[in-house]
Amino acid sequence: MPRRKSDPALPFRPFAEDAGVQTLAGFSIENGTQRIALHGSLDLTRDRAGLERARTLKSLFEAIVATLETEDLPDSIPDEPETAEPVRNPFA
């Protein structure tokens, strides 16, 4: 079975940057150079709209898998510590 290429209309390039977000209904896929974060929920309804959302989701995941398959990957990467940046007190 031939592999379906990812949708070229999608601006999402997995692991290419730390600022991009692809949103699909209430579901967000946040791009990062070391990890991709998934947030929210998505209903895949049994209609044409649900089919289109499912195809878009499939396309996004196929792009992620294809990118990972081309790389020499470590067994795991360490969790990123949350770094707090000081914020100037607006009331001081």
Image (spheres, rainbow, N blue to C red):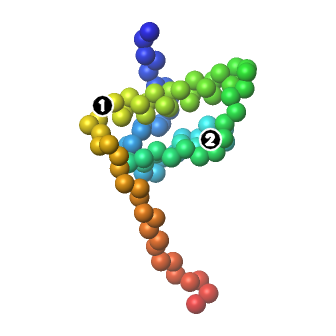
Return the mark for residue 15: none
Q: Is residue 4 above or below residue 37?
A: above
Among the 4 quarters of the image, the one containing residue 55: top right
- Three-letter amino acid code at disc 1? Thr
Q: Residue furthest front?
A: 75
Q: Nearer the viewer, residue 73 or 92?
A: 73
Asked whether disc 1 touches disc 2, contact meaning CB atoms under 8 Å apart, the reply is no
> Measured from the top left, where is residue 77 in percent x and y?
35, 50
> Measured from the top left, where is residue 29 in percent x and y?
53, 42
Among the 4 quarters of the image, the one containing residue 63: top left
> Measured from the top left, where is residue 21 in percent x and y?
52, 45
Q: Nearer the viewer, residue 71 or 25?
A: 71
Pointer 2: what residue? Answer: 27
Among the 4 quarters of the image, the one containing residue 14: top left
- Three-letter amino acid code at disc 2? Phe
Pointer 1: what residue? Answer: 70
Picture quarter with the C terminus: bottom right
Q: Name the residue: 55% across, 44% down.
A: 38
Q: Is residue 53 above or below residue 40?
A: above
Picture quarter with the N terminus: top left
Q: Name the residue: 50% across, 31% down.
A: 60
Left or right: 39, with 75 as reference point: right
Q: Name the residue: 38% across, 29% down.
A: 66
Q: Is residue 56 above or below residue 29?
A: above
